[in-house]
Amino acid sequence: MTPRSSITSLRGGAIGAIGAADLDEKTTLAQETAARWFSRTLSLRSPLDAPLPERPGRPDKPVLIAPTQVERRSLHTVKGRIALLHAIAHIELNAVDLALDIVARFATEPVPNSFFDGWMQVAFEEAKHFRMVRARHELVRANFRGPLKPPFNDIARAEAGLTPSFYRSLTSTSNA
């Protein structure tokens, strides 16, 4: 994990988080950079800032496959609801990277600090949302009876067993 002291500026912290392939590191860097920016202990940019990566960092596994290559699922099925949870995790992670990308790209432009405040708040909250969805998704993984094999798709889920209580929690309309 990248040490806290390696965040030398707002732009540098954003670039570090974007490039991080480890998702825990990515979300920690995003939130730590935001916290330090809000406490006004970071400069906007530094000559030490790394260049912006061409693509956001992602783990090697699970293997990413195009949505068009995955069988369509109905939200009226357990598999469909699990797939929706997985898709939401991807959306939250992409939102983190997009907010940070805006910060990194505009840190060299003459814009007010309030611009960066807003986008860092987005990055912070999307990182929090990703962690929440990921924790829920890990409950699914913890209840599989067999090993998970990439790519994670309908076939792998069909071969796995999930507890009925987990399914009920997905369809529950109460927060109790």
Image (tube, grey):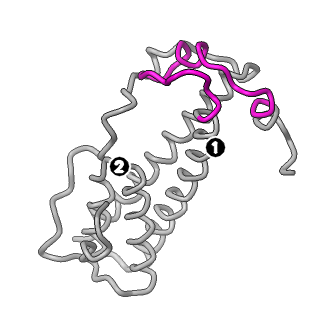
Element under disc 1: helix
Other-residue count near label 1 (Cα within 10 Å), few / some / many at <14 / 14–19 / ≥20: some
Choose between 173 and 23: the one closer to the eye.
23
Query: Position of 34 compared to 135: left or right?
Result: left
Q: Secondary structure at mark 2?
A: loop
Q: Do callouts 1 and 2 mark residues in contact (Cβ within 8 Å)?
A: no
Pick the front one: 134 or 50: 134
Q: Quadrant of the N terminus?
A: bottom left
| Nearer to the camera, 149 or 81 | 149
In the image, which disc is placed on residue 22? Answer: 2
Q: Amino acid at mark 2?
A: Asp
Q: CA distance from mark 1 to mark 2?
A: 18 Å
Q: Residue at x 28, y 83 (%)?
A: 43
**Residue 41, relative to residue 166: is it above or below?**
below
Q: Residue at x 69, y 18 (%)?
A: 74
- Is 160 drawn above or below residue 12 in the view shown? above
Instruction: Name the mark on residue 136.
Output: 1
Q: Amino acid at mark 1?
A: Arg
Q: Position of residue 171 (x, y in %)?
A: 80, 33
The residue positioned 26% from the left and 44% from the top of the image is: 55
In this picture, which residue range is highlighted in magenta? 142-167
Q: Position of residue 115 (x, y in %)?
A: 42, 72
Q: In this orientation, does residue 110 appear? A: no
Residue that extends furthest to the bottom in the rendered view of this protein: 40
